């Protein structure tokens, strides 16, 4: 995680500046943006759909191969996935019209990705690759050595904020990008409700990846990192692998969905025999995460699914508690949760929604975004196409 939201100095001590919206140019295709996190690498690819006959005739065969490979598959090997449900169609970008594709794969598969790039001859088409996240620094030499690609490394928090604003302003195929949950803990009454994010300031953004960064955003170009925690999605996956023997995030979430955390956690009623009425604490409130696991009988009775659910609840509650305290400190009522920890994870989203509403007596609202963990990659794409309307330093 970056230590703060400020851009890092350029390697030679100088800085370049993001061009304003009026100074647009068209880089050669293909257009990529990448966010290389500690657990997942996220890639966005802009596929032009307004190619003229002259362009098609002049297009290199290697570009045609790349386009066909990326757009005709939904899976790439055993680990790469194109999230087709997130595809943005007919998106205007840098004077072109096309579709934006969203692809993810484990960061552990980076070397295989780079060898694929070498096989598809990426370097013959595009020698600079805009990337953000810690992996942009970690894998910089590998990009050049294996795939012949020069990385333009961008600050991850800059890219995150710019990506959020751009995706929301572009609309998601005509629907709302931002939403919240009404009656989150009532399966029979729970509703996913659209939220108008056109004028959101100020708001808190909680970016849940391997770890967690929390930012206060006051305008399009005024934001700061105010807190964070090392207990994030990577913690959940790592503990689940240790406790249950699962191998993937999807497996861990599926196990959690079938578990009961109350078989693992110590609740208020386990201590008080019921509710703690003075402070309006329900007897079902978790008093101690994993608090029953020192009891041999309960430990032996707990299933792997129970352990996965308790792990998910523990991590989620911790993130929600920190986010709430940050919102109170900054006196901000809107809290936006993003990041790949929330992918296929409605349990955590509903827990966060309920906790933020309950503990603030309805003053704080938990908001979510459809594209979850892809905003950093979108921010990197914006820098490539030079359509970002923000004029702040970036490293080169």
Image (cartoon, rainbow, N blue to C red):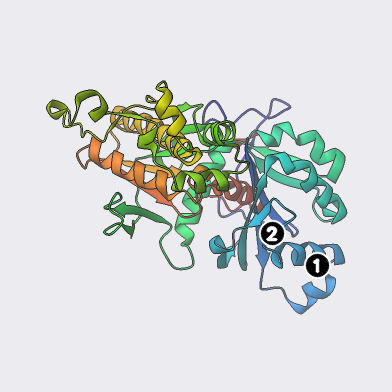
Q: Is residue 140 left or right of residue 350?
A: right
Q: Residue 374 location, x and y as percent?
A: 56, 49
Q: Residue 261 location, x and y as percent?
A: 39, 37
Image quadrant assignment for residue 202: top left
Residue at image x 82%, y 65%?
Answer: 65
The front one of 12 and 58 is 58
* Figure check: 36 above or below 174: above
The front one of 45 and 224 is 45
Q: Which residue is mark 1?
A: 64
Residue at image x 74%, y 43%?
Answer: 109
| Distance Cα–Cα, label 1 vs label 2 | 19 Å
* Figure check: 54 above or below 345: below
Q: Residue furthest left?
A: 278
**Callout 2: helix, strand or loop?**
strand
Q: Is residue 361 left or right of residue 304?
A: left
Q: Which mark is residue 141?
A: none
Image quadrant assignment for residue 69: bottom right
**Callout 1: helix, strand or loop?**
helix
Residue at image x 20%, y 24%?
Answer: 272
């Amino acid at each position: 995680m970056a230590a703060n939201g400020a851009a890092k100095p350029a390697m030679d001590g100088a800085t370049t500046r993001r061009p304003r919206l009026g100074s647009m140019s068209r880089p050669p295709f293909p257009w990529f943006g990448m966010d290389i996190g500690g657990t997942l690498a996220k890639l966005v690819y802009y596929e032009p759909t307004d190619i003229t006959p002259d362009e098609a005739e002049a297009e290199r065969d290697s570009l045609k191969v790349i386009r066909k490979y990326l757009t005709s598959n939904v899976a790439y090997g055993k680990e790469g996935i194109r999230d087709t449900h997130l595809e943005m169609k007919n998106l205007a970008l840098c004077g072109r019209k096309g579709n934006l594709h969203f692809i993810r794969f484990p960061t552990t598969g980076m070397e295989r990705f780079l060898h694929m790039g070498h096989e598809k001859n990426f370097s013959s088409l595009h020698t600079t690759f805009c990337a953000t996240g810690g992996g942009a620094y970690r894998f910089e030499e590998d990009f050049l050595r294996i795939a012949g690609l020069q990385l333009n490394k961008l600050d991850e928090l800059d890219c995150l904020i710019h990506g959020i604003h751009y995706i929301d302003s572009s609309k998601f195929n005509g629907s709302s990008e931002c939403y919240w949950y009404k009656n989150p803990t009532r399966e029979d009454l729970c509703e996913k409700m659209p939220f108008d994010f056109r004028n959101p300031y100020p708001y808190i953004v909680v970016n849940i990846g391997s770890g967690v960064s929390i930012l206060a955003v006051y305008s399009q170009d005024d934001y700061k990192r105010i807190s964070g925690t090392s207990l994030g999605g990577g913690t959940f996956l790592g503990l689940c692998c240790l406790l249950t023997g699962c191998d993937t995030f999807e497996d861990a979430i599926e196990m959690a969905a079938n578990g009961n955390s109350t078989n693992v956690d110590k609740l208020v009623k386990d201590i008080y025999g019921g509710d703690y009425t003075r402070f309006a604490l329900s007897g079902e409130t978790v008093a101690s995460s994993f608090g029953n696991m020192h009891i041999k009988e309960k430990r032996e009775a707990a299933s792997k699914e129970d352990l996965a659910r308790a792990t998910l609840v523990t991590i989620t509650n911790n993130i929600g508690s920190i986010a709430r305290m940050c919102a109170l400190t900054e006196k901000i009522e809107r809290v936006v949760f993003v990041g790949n920890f929330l992918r296929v994870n409605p349990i955590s989203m509903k827990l966060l929604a309920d906790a933020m509403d309950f503990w603030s007596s309805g003053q704080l609202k938990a908001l979510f975004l459809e594209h979850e963990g892809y905003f950093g990659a979108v921010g990197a794409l914006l820098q490539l196409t030079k359509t970002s309307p923000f004029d702040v330093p970036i490293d080169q």
